[in-house]
Image (cartoon, helix red, strand yellow):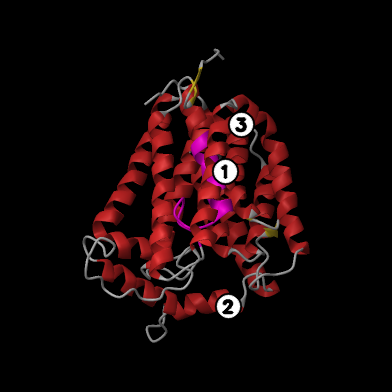
Amino acid sequence: MRNRKITLLGPEGTNISIFFLFLVFNFISWFTLFTLSVDINLDFSNILIRQIIFSLISISVFFLLTYISIETILRFTDIIFIITVLALLLLFTTEPRLGVRRWFDLGLIDLQPSEFAKVILILFVAKYLSEKKFNFFILAGLILTVMLIVNQPDLGTGIIITSVLVSMLFVTNIRLRYFLLIFLILIFSFFVFLEVGIINENQLDRVNNFFQEEEVDFQQSQSRLSISSGGFFGQYFQENQVNKVFVPVETTDFIFSAYAYNFGFIGVFFLLLLWVIFFIRLTQILNISSSEFDKYVITGFIVLLAIQIIINISTVIGLVPNTGLPFPLLSLGGSSMVSIAFVFGITNRIFIENNLVI
């Protein structure tokens, strides 16, 4: 690997467009939370400043990863995967919060291991697929990890991780028996989870209520009203604003409704266009890189972010039951933001090693 000069943006070859998009997404999150703090009288210092601190940590993670070679990441992937599984196990020793065990209370911040597990599992699977060492033992470890996440309970994250892993296997020449095995295990696990209560009645009720026309989810109903109130240009820059409707958890899972209310169709189009540009940039690696590891990782990242965005928007507008998934780099939350910084940082490093500068 050739030595690279150090520049203001990191090692020589740092991809400017990836870094720029990362900064823009962070700024959009700040501005959206600022408008929310004004709209619903939130504590400005407790919301926006927290997110800015998370962003600064995320930017630091992004730059740190630009100095770490993919070879080094590969070397430590197994250890990080084991630490992740242990962290997910330790969650069951914590006190439930709102009926779930998803966070470690570290005082000033909460740490959510499942957010980092999304990225780490992609790296772990990509390593063994690229080395042609994927086997039943690796598959068993992945299934165990997903089961630990679903048991928190966090069914939405479990579904996303499963979808990502299946998509990564799909793009390989892996034998059909693995797909059949995964399919049978998923069906079997679903009924086991129902029997032992891992998938609880509350989760099933949310799905049942969604398909019953007389049962309308309050959050989704309010969210649709908020989005429709935004109109074409949004309400933030209007002199005579339409009254803001109350939407629960609007700083986290339903922040897209607040964004659409304030910035309208134009703002939504701009935000999604930026993500499309990012995905297009990622696909360049699939066409240029000779590294199978790079291709598997990028495939996993694209599917992870695309599915999470699609599910979040679908939930907010009422197309699917409430899943509790955040919108990447928009929702309030340190673990989610830092984990996505890993995606952007590793992506940038892959671009550097493939000499894709702009």
Alpha-carbon distance for marks 2 and 3?
Answer: 41 Å
Q: Which residue is mark 1?
A: 57
**Amino acid bearing label 1:** Ile
At label 3, the amino acid type is: Lys
> Which numbered disc flags the more N-terminal residue, 3 or 1?
1
The residue at which mark 3 appears reads as 132
Name the residue carrying label 2: 202
Residue at x 52% of width, y 15% of height: 4
User: Of the residues shown, which amino acid type is indicated by label 2?
Assistant: Asn
Q: Which residues are magenta?
A: 325-345
Disc number for residue 49: none
Is the residue marked by circle 3 packed among few (<14), some (14-19), or many (20+) residues within 10 Å? few
Q: Nearer the viewer, mark 1 or mark 2?
A: 1
* Helix, strand or loop status at disc 3: loop
7 relative to 87, above or below: above
Reply yes or no: does residue 334 show up in magenta: yes
Residue 12, horizontal then vertical, whole percent: 48, 19
